[in-house]
Image (cartoon, rainbow, N blue to C red):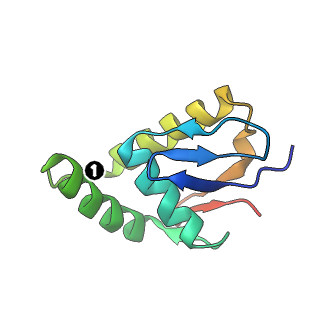
Amino acid sequence: MRPTLHLTSPDLLQIAAGLPPLPLSPMESALVRVLLDAQGGLVPTERLMHKLYVARAIITGEPAVKPNGLVHLVHQLRRRCRRAGLPDTWLTTVRGWGYRIAA
């Protein structure tokens, strides 16, 4: 299955036509939104940290996203998507640089 990812609402990720949308946490949704906006391009870790810092401050009122928090969030998102049938290769880690959604 070739994924055709898009957010159908702020907290639902549509993986492919015919499959039910996947519910996401607010932080997972913020992460996916930034990655989708890059249209397959590399999103530097620093940019993700900044975007998620702002999202977390809005969502929880706690302005703190630590580097290991980003790694945990990516792991959590991959695990949730894997359970829905999406292969791990949809989200690529470029060590030392950032993340991108595989084209």
Q: Position of residue 102 (x, y in %)?
A: 73, 59
Q: Relative to 65, say whether 96 is above or below.
A: below
In this rendered view, identify the residue nearer to me: 10 or 102: 10
Q: In which quadrant will I find the N terminus?
A: top right
Tell me the residue at 15%/55% (across/down): 63
Q: Where is residue 38 in the image (x, y as percent from the top left)?
A: 58, 73
Question: In terms of secondary structure, where does tag 1 sit?
Answer: loop
Crowd around label 1: few <14 · some 14–19 · many ≥20 (10 Å): few
What amino acid is found at the position of numbered circle 1 in the picture? Lys
Which quarter of the figure has residue 78? top right
Please indicate whether residue 21 sits to the left or right of residue 32 in the image.
right
Q: In which quadrant will I find the C terminus?
A: bottom right
Give the residue number, with chain letter if any, for mark 1.
66
Tell me the residue at 67%/69% (across/down): 40
Tell me the residue at 37%/47% (across/down): 27
Residue at the far left in the pictured view: 61
Tell me the residue at 26%/52% (across/down): 65
